[in-house]
Structures are given as C-alpha cells and as structure tokens.
Image: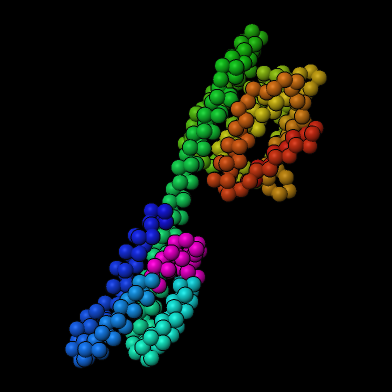
Amino acid sequence: MLKKYNSYQLLLISLIAAMFVIYPDITWLPYDLEKLGGSGKANYISFFLLRYTFLAGLIFLLIKINLEQIKTADFKKRFAYNTIISGVAFAIYGGISFLMYTRLKHYGSLVLFQFFIVSILSTLMGHIVTLYNEQRKKEQEIEELKVKNLQSRYDALTNQINPHFFFNSLNGLTSLIRKKNNEETLTYVNKLSDVFRYILQSDKKGLVTLGEELTFVDAFRYMMEIRFANKLEYHMNIDENALSQKVPVLSILPLLDNVVVHNRIDSDHKMVIDIFINENNELVVSNPVYPKLGLSETNGTGLKNLESRYLLLMDRQIKVENKGKVFNVYLPLG
C-alpha cells in the first residue's frame, strides 16, 4: 500500500487535508481582514499562511510516520503516538508564532482543536491502512495456501502415483491373485482405492482430524506391508482421545514415503516405523536409518512443503531429528 504513494502524492494529500482542517479560518478571513489596516492585513495573512503551512507539514509528517514507522494494529496505541507528536508540534507552533509575531494570537482552543483533529485523522488513516494491509496479507496467505495444497497434491501424485508406485501396486495385486487369496485380494483393492481417493481429494481440504489421516495411513500401510512382505512394519500407538485433533492433510504421507525412498528395506534391514504421540502432544514418526548405497531419487520438497503448510495452517513448526541411527519427525497437533 505504502509503495503506491510517492512524496508528491503525500504532499498533495497533506495540503488538501490541511485546507479542510483550517477551513473555519478560511471562512473568517474576509471578515477579519476588513477590521484591520494595511500592515495589519499583511501581518494577519502571513500568520494565516504560517498556520496553514505548519499544519500541512505536520499532516505530511504524521502520514509518513503512520505508514512507515507505526506498525501496531492497536488503535489506542496509534492514537497515543499521534497525540504525543501533535502535542509537541502544538508547543513548537506556539513558540514560533510568539517569536515571529511577539504574541500568542490564535493559540487558543480553536488551534488546539485543529491539532487534535489532525491527530485523529492521522490515526484513522494509519489504522485503516494497517487493517487493509493485514487483510491483504491474509488473502495472500490464503492464495499461498491454495498453491501449497496444490503443490502437496502434485508432490503426492508424482511421488506415489507414478509408474513405479503404480506398477508395484499392480505387482502386489498380481501376486495376491496368483495366490488365489480372494479375501486378501479384495482387501488390497479396497485399500488401493482408499489411497487414491484420499490423495485426489486432498486439494479440497486444509486441516483434517488425526483420525482421518490415520485411516489413510492404515490403507497405505497395508499396501506397503504387502509390497515388502515381512520386511516392513508399522507400529501405531495412538490414544483415541487424540483422534479429533487437527493436522494438515497428507502430513504423514511424505514422512512414510521418505522412509522407503531413503532407506534399504530387505531381509538384513527390517524396517519398523513407529507412530505415536509424545508428552508434548506431538505426533512422532520414527524409523531406524539404513541409508541406501546410491543417491535416492527424490525432489527433496516433501519436508519443506510440509513445513510450509504447517506454518500457514497452524502457525507451528515441525521438528526433524536425525540421530544417525534413528530418524524422528515431530508434528504438532492442534
């Protein structure tokens, strides 16, 4: 908002505002001049111009201060700052008028009221601009959140519903069909459907309950355990009273995906993922570290995206802890 105004525009606003503030003096000017002689008229006009110039300068100063320096959204504090500045300016104006005209003419209640009006106008302007900027900031955060949610959906789709993941899912399904285990095959298909549906609908959600997120994790877990046979296990220890708490949608997926992407999972490196709530009311996803020998195929945006969405949706930060042999991620619950 501030960057849209240059000094010339602010000066023009100040001159117009000062004219409205000093309007009573303008209306009385012809009548006062009729009562004065030649030298008196010149003296009166110069005194009038002094007051107008001083008020315009004060308004310009207060506008600059309110737009650039005073950041508080508290109307009372802003008014107090402007009143103090106006009070100091009122005293300076009195000193200048006394020194230049050897009297304190028009230094009474009307001038004091005019300085008070200047203070109120400046406070209102600064407060309105602050509220406007806060509203714009919220709108920008909402737009950014939409982008982040779309990015989250995109990351989920590219990381999970890619040919590698899709074919692995089909391979898992094929192996179940060959075993002619119809009940397990139907369960697998249902879980696969649940995973796809949750991911595809994630862009319509912001915060979800922990219960919803864990229901998705349960479907995802079933597929991964089928894929890795007895080499991958998920241990979830969550109190039912915590299931109504909120987390950003798809918070746990990138963490589970990172475990598979960055670690070896085989007969010699059995992976056990623990999901629980600690004493700080944080959801903890913990796993042992079995780093792959080669570079992992990942875009590296999963945790960054999750951290950004947490800041926007909950104004909280996630914590990542790598102890060398154990990798922990702490997700605050709301």
Rendered position, 57 above or below 214: below
Q: Residue at x 60, y 32 (%)?
A: 301
Q: Residue at x 67, y 19 (%)?
A: 226
Q: Residue at x 27, y 82 (%)?
A: 45
In front of the other: 68 or 104: 104
Residue range (magenta): 58-78
The N terminus - image quarter = bottom left
Expressed as whole percent of the image width and height from the top left, the position of residue 71 reads 50, 62
Expressed as whole percent of the image width and height from the top left, the position of residue 315 reads 58, 49
Q: Is residue 219 left or right of residue 42?
A: right
Rendered position, 274 above or below 318: above
Res 124 seen here: no
In front of the other: 273 or 101: 101
Which quadrant of the view contains residue 171?
A: top right
Rendered position, 150 above or below 181: below
Q: Is residue 177 left or right of residue 107?
A: right
Q: Is residue 98 magenta?
A: no
